[in-house]
Structures are given as C-alpha cells and as structure tokens.
Image: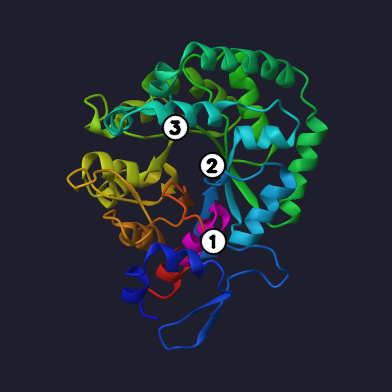
C-alpha cells in the first residue's frame, strides 16, 4: 500500500484499518503496531508525541477502566484529559452537557450551526429547561469539588501511569468568570494528575483572570481556539493574549484555524512555535469549499495535515499533537476504532513519509 493509495481510501476502508494489527511499509514488509513490548500503548511516532483528547470518545461509556481500555485499543499513550472525564472517574455527578448540546444542535439550521462561536454560542441557544438542568448540575458539582478525595486523585494518576499513559493536559476550563476557588481547584487538580497544563477557550479576559494561578502552580494556561482567528479581535494573531504572562500558551486547533480563515497553519506554527504547547489534530475543508469548514476523515479534507505533522517532526517535536475526532463515525465503526485509525495515519506519515 503506497501513501497515495492510503490517502485516497474511503471512510469505510479507513475505519477498517483500525482492525488491522499492522501496516505495510513502502517496501512491502509488514510493519507491526507501535506498541511497547509489554503491551502498553505507544503513540510517539518519529519523535512526535501523538495522542488524543478524551472528547474524541464522548459517545462511549466513561469511567477510569474504560478510558484505559480505549487508550490501549487505539494505541494512545498521550492524553489531553477532559475535566469531566476525569471527575467522572472520581465520582462526580453526571454532566448533562452532552445531551443538552445534542438537543441544541438538533434544533439549529446548518446556517445557525456554522455561525456558532464556541461554548458561549451554545449557552445562548439553550432553552429554559436546559438552563435549569445545568444550574442544578452546577450546584451538585460544586459540592463534589469542595469534598474532593485527593487520595483518590493520586490513585487515579498512578493507574494511568502504570499503563504507560501520559496526561499532559487536564481540560478543566477555568475562565474569565471563574471564582478564585474554581481557578485554584482547576490547577491543583491538573497538577495532582501530573499534567503540565490546563486548557480553556481563548479570550484576553480569561488569560488575565487565570494567569496568576498558572504562575502559582508553575503550569501552563493553554488557550484553545475555535473561530477566534476569523474575528477582528484575533485576526492579527494571539499576541495580546500571550503578552499577559509567559505561562500563557496555546492549545492550537490548526484545522479550526484553516477551516475558518483559509490560512496555512504551518505559517502560524512557524511564528508561534515557542508558545504552542499542544495542537488539536484533524482534517477539514476550507472556508471556500462547497461545504465549508466541515470535518473530514483524515487525508480527505483540505487541511495541510501531513505538512503540519512533518513540520512538528522536523523542527518542533516538543509540541503535543492530539487527535480530536469530530468527523462523522460510520455505523459499522466506533470512535475508539477511528482514533486508532488516526494514530495509524499519523504513524505512517511520520515513520514512512
């Protein structure tokens, strides 16, 4: 199988690759999966730390053992761990956000979906019942945090470590409206899990609010983008955010950047490489496509995905590259298999070329 054939494969065939125990190299020799000899996952390919955000498995049952199983099945050894996924492992009340989001998105027209701007836009679209559900949840959740069992946090960290899974980010999302207690908790929890950073949506106000806590805990506050770079505030770049503190870094979603602006993300990476801690990795169409800014199976969109991976490999291997699975999963597959397929894609680009 040569690279051109691999990139031209349909979604069904790509999904099937997740079931194949090894891949074929350019000279026809079998290439085994990149797992360690002890059976632990290993998604460090060609010097690049590939991983995933656990949001990729949002349609799968949660819990500690399930997350570890998904990592093993998909061969993922680096995690951006969603805060709600971690706290579910620790006994938090069930978060209704995913169900609410599905309900909201189901009511919107394609034009309204396209026009949404991150979580704030979602909140604006909630009805009264959905807002009440979130308010009730927030109250119960606050009580859970106040009574956190920190010994259980330590046990959970050690469980991931024992399976060879590195947690580099905990996405607890403290922001401009977070209380001191919530900010303190977010960084304390991430630190206790061995992470190097906390992520949240990019705004200048959020950076100013949370930078002191990042500095206190000697961690990074990593600013994530959806469509911000297509707005006047950030069209020229994230300089105003980065100037707040050296502990402010970027959790750069280069496909969102490309899909909303049409600009080559490699140019952005070259300019801001020393302030990019991690990147969400995926494929999309561009803003001028017939179906603009639409998630695609890796290799079938217009995002210069291979070029980004090769750039990181050749010049900036300190940047984590985390798969964020957002394309539609076919009925005969599931999100764990698809993340595994994405890991195989990255391995092929980085180790075979």
**Does the magenta segment cover residue 343?**
yes
Does label 3 or label 1 sit earlier along the sequence?
3
Disc 3: which residue: 246
Characterize the local packing of mark 3: few (<14), some (14-19) or many (20 or more) Cα atoms within 10 angstroms: few
Q: Determine the residue located farthest toward the left in the rendered image.
A: 288
In-image side of 254 versus 175 (left or right): left
Q: Is residue 47 visible?
A: no
The residue located at (34%, 27%) in the rendering is: 117
Image location of residue 338, percent across then percent down = 50, 58
The residue located at (36%, 80%) in the rendering is: 2
Disc 2: which residue: 55
99 vs 15: above or below: above
| Highlighted range, magenta | 333-344
Q: Is residue 39 visible?
A: yes
In-image side of 141 versus 26 (left or right): right
Characterize the local packing of mark 1: few (<14), some (14-19) or many (20 or more) Cα atoms within 10 angstroms: many
Q: Nearer the viewer, residue 166 or 41?
A: 41
């Amino acid at each position: 199988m040569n690279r051109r054939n691999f990139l031209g494969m349909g979604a069904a065939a790509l999904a099937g690759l997740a079931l194949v125990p090894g891949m074929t190299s350019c000279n026809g020799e079998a290439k085994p999966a990149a797992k360690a000899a002890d059976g632990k996952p290993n998604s460090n390919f060609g010097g690049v730390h590939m991983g995933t955000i656990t949001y990729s498995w949002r349609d799968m049952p949660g819990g500690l053992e399930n997350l570890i199983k998904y990592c093993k099945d998909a061969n993922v050894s680096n995690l951006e761990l969603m805060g709600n996924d971690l706290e579910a492992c620790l006994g938090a009340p069930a978060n209704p956000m995913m169900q609410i989001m599905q309900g909201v998105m189901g009511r919107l027209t394609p034009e309204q979906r396209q026009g949404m701007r991150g979580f704030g836009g979602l909140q604006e679209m909630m009805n009264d019942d959905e807002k009440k559900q979130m308010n009730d949840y927030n109250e119960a959740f606050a009580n859970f945090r106040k009574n956190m069992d920190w010994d259980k946090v330590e046990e959970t960290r050690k469980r991931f470590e024992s399976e060879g899974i590195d947690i580099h980010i905990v996405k607890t999302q403290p922001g401009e409206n977070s209380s001191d207690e919530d900010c303190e908790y977010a960084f304390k929890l991430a630190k206790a899990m061995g992470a190097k950073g906390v992520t949240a949506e990019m705004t200048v106000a959020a950076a100013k609010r949370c930078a002191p806590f990042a500095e206190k805990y000697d961690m990074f506050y990593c600013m994530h983008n959806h469509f911000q770079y297509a707005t006047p505030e950030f069209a020229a770049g994230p300089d105003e955010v980065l100037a707040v503190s050296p502990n402010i870094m970027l959790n750069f979603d280069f496909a969102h950047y490309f899909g909303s602006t049409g600009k080559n993300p490699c140019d952005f990476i070259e300019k801001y490489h020393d302030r990019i801690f991690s990147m969400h990795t995926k494929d999309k169409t561009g803003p001028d496509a017939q179906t603009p800014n639409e998630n695609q199976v890796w290799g079938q969109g217009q995002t210069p995905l291979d070029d980004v991976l090769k750039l990181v490999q050749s010049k900036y291997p300190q940047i984590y590259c985390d798969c964020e699975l957002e394309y539609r999963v076919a009925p005969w597959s599931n999100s764990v298999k698809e993340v595994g397929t994405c890991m195989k894609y990255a391995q092929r680009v980085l180790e075979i070329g």
